[in-house]
Amino acid sequence: MALETGTFAFGAAVFPLTPSTANPLVRDADPALATALDFFAWGIENYLGARLLAQAALQGLALPGAVAIKIGIEPSPFLYSDQFKFPIFALYRKQDAWDEHTVVFDKSRSTWEFAYVLPPLTPLQQDALNPILRGVAAVLRRLAHQGVDPGYLSGAPVWGQGYGRLQNARLVSASYGGFEKLDANQQYYRAVTGRIEVLEREMPVAGAFDSLAGVDGALDVTDSDGTTVPDVVDVRTGP
């Protein structure tokens, strides 16, 4: 009952949140989303960045990178701001549904949406750069399915790491086309948008339950004639 009414955990975050300024708020309050945002942005930059920048340069378009900014909200408010550069990669929550709840964990199936937005392009630039949107969807689908990449975290699995994090992700759909239209010049931002289904296992803080370290047991087998074979199964827990 103390877990329900006192301090509790959501993924790798412990509530109440401390007023720490060391991490972005999304990292402390929604570690699963922050983990996926970093992983996917890295994949886009790593797999598509060199070709995207080269193709853009041929079209007279200077881009700072394959991902100039990554954000955890729907990106429309950023489109009209001079403070942000393109391309934008946004990954954000749309819905959570809790499938199972026990004293030990909550299991949720979440719907996330993403948007990868290029700057306004001329028709020729659109023709040259539009295939990159298909490439972004392919990269996200691969990384979501595998949850690991040899070049990221030295090949350590991303999904399931830590104490109660994101367990699995699946890209469900992607759409390609104009994202928003500017009123001033009637130009379109080119974008790929889509939906990702996520399985999360949210667990209590470490130490909330007694450790099994040092607990062991054995199973003996006794035949019909009374002969006993000891320790047929020997179970011992590690620290």
Image: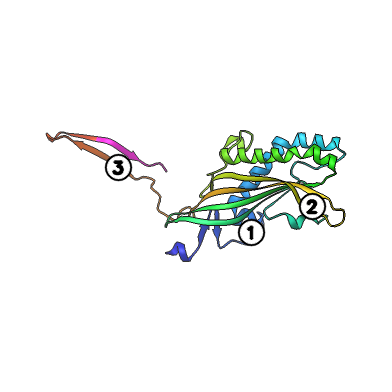
Element type where label 3 sits in the image: strand
Precedes in sequence: disc 3 or disc 1: 1
Q: Distance between the Cα atoms at labels 3 and 1?
A: 44 Å
- Cβ atoms at labels 2 and 3 below 8 Å apart: no
Taking the magenta stretch, the answer to whether it contains residue 162 is: no
Element type where label 2 sits in the image: loop
Q: Give me the disc on residue 84.
A: 2
Kind of residue indicated by mark 2: Phe
The stretch in magenta equals 231-239
Q: Nearer the viewer, mark 2 or mark 3?
A: 2
What residue is disc 1 on? 20
Kind of residue indicated by mark 1: Ser
Q: Position of residue 40 (x, y in %)?
A: 65, 43
What residue is disc 3 on? 217
The residue closer to the viewer here, 67 or 138, is: 138
Point 88% across, 39% down: residue: 60
Q: Residues within 10 Å of mark 1 (few under 14, many from 20)?
A: few
